[in-house]
Amino acid sequence: MLIPTERAFWILDYYRRHQIRLAFGASILGEVAACSATVTYVWRETHAIGIKLLDEDSDQVWDRLIPLARANFAFVQMGDPEFLPFTTASFRSIHSILMILFSDGTTMFLAEPRTFDDAPFRESDVM
């Protein structure tokens, strides 16, 4: 379900304020990747976020700035009819998913676990 940019940035800021460890996934130029992530900064004025990408053991960290000015957003959560495709065993620990959609076909998602005990995520959990 598409949501307004303002709501997407409220969700992103919620993730940041509560330091929620998320499952991050992306399909960029046909390449798919997944890892754990935390949102570190939210700039509503410039429509950008800072994100920390973590490997499975959190030994390696990559900080990234992601401009979102031209992105569209979709959000689904447990109970929504649109969430049904995500009710497979691979997504068993997911509560909600914020999808970030770019006009070049790039798609990113941030999935919130049902409980903090469900994190960290592995690539096999989200792909």
Image: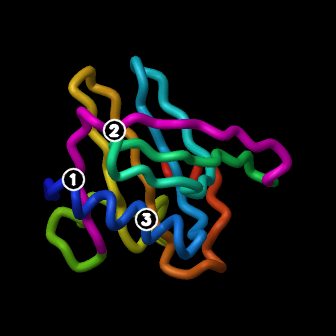
Quarter of the image for residue 76 reads: bottom left
Q: Which residue is mark 1?
A: 5
| First-in-chain label (2 vs 3) | 3
Question: Is residue 99 among what the camera can see?
Answer: yes
Is 1 on the left-hand or right-hand side of 125?
left
SS category of the residue bearing label 1: helix
Is 71 on the left-hand or right-hand side of 48?
left
Is residue 68 highlighted in magenta? Answer: yes
Marks 3 and 1 sit apart, C-alpha to C-alpha, by 12 Å
Rendered position, 4 above or below 116: above
Is 7 on the left-hand or right-hand side of 121?
left
**Picture disc at residue 56:** none
Residue numbers of the magenta segment:
58-77
Image coords of residue 124 (percent x, y): 59, 49
Residue at figure coordinates x 35%, y 41% from the top left: 46
Q: Which residue is mark 3?
A: 13
| First-in-chain label (1 vs 2) | 1
| First-in-chain label (3 vs 1) | 1
